Image (tube, grey):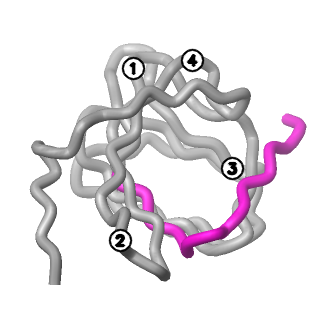
């Protein structure tokens, strides 16, 4: 067993074409063979582009207000909300214009992310 204190995990900047600005990530389960678990921190107004994942993705909102959108709907999410995004579903998520936003993301290790057109 390993216990990780989220507030003690250093943030790593992430600059990638998937994001509309710079976000940071705090990897929480580096030793897991099966799960990729991280906190992703979005500044106000920053989000990711339309994308899909090879495996299901779970988002657990830990700070601020965010938006999660699919082709069919767009929803505001707040601390305590849990979002389950099925494998292959086209979506995006990120901070609202007036609030930073953080979530824990859980996916299968090795799952690929495919950036999609809007």
Above or below 24: residue 57: below
**Mark 3: secondary structure:** strand
Residue 91's tag is: 3
Report the residue marked by disc 1.
43
Q: Tell me which numbered mark, 4 or 3, is placed earlier along the sequence.
A: 4
- Tell me where the magenta segment starts and ends, as one range: 104-118
Residue at image position (39%, 76%) is 32
Question: How many residues crowd mark 4 within 10 Å: few (<14), some (14–19), many (20+)?
Answer: some
Residue picked out by circle 4: 21
Q: Residues within 10 Å of mark 3 (few under 14, many from 20)?
A: many
Q: Residues within 10 Å of mark 1 (few under 14, many from 20)?
A: many
Residue 64 colored in magenta in the image: no
Taking the image as shown, residue 75 lies to the left or right of residue 101, namely right
Whichever of callouts 1 and 4 sits on the residue coming sooner in the sequence is: 4
Could you tell whether 15 is left or right of 104 in the image? Answer: right
Residue 111 lies left or right of residue 94; in this view the side is right
Q: Secondary structure at mark 2?
A: loop
Which residue is labeled 2 in the image?
31
Q: Nearer the viewer, mark 3 or mark 2?
A: 2
> Is 7 rendered above or below residue 89?
above
Residue 47 point in image, percent of width and height: 56, 29
Between the C-alphas of marks 1 and 4, the distance is 8 Å
Q: State which tag comes first along the sequence, 3 or 2.
A: 2
Q: CA–CA distance between discs 3 and 1? A: 19 Å
């Amino acid at each position: 067993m390993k216990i990780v204190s989220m507030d003690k995990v250093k943030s790593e900047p992430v600059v990638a074409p998937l994001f509309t600005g710079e976000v940071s990530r705090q990897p929480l389960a580096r030793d897991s063979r099966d799960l990729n678990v991280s906190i992703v921190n979005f500044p106000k107004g920053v989000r990711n582009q339309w994308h899909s994942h090879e495996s299901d993705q779970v988002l657990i909102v830990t700070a601020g207000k965010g938006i999660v959108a699919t082709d069919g709907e767009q929803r505001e999410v707040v601390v305590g909300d849990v979002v389950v995004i099925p494998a292959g579903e086209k979506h995006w998520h990120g901070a609202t214009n007036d609030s930073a936003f953080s979530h824990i993301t859980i996916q299968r290790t090795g799952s690929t992310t495919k950036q999609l057109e809007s």
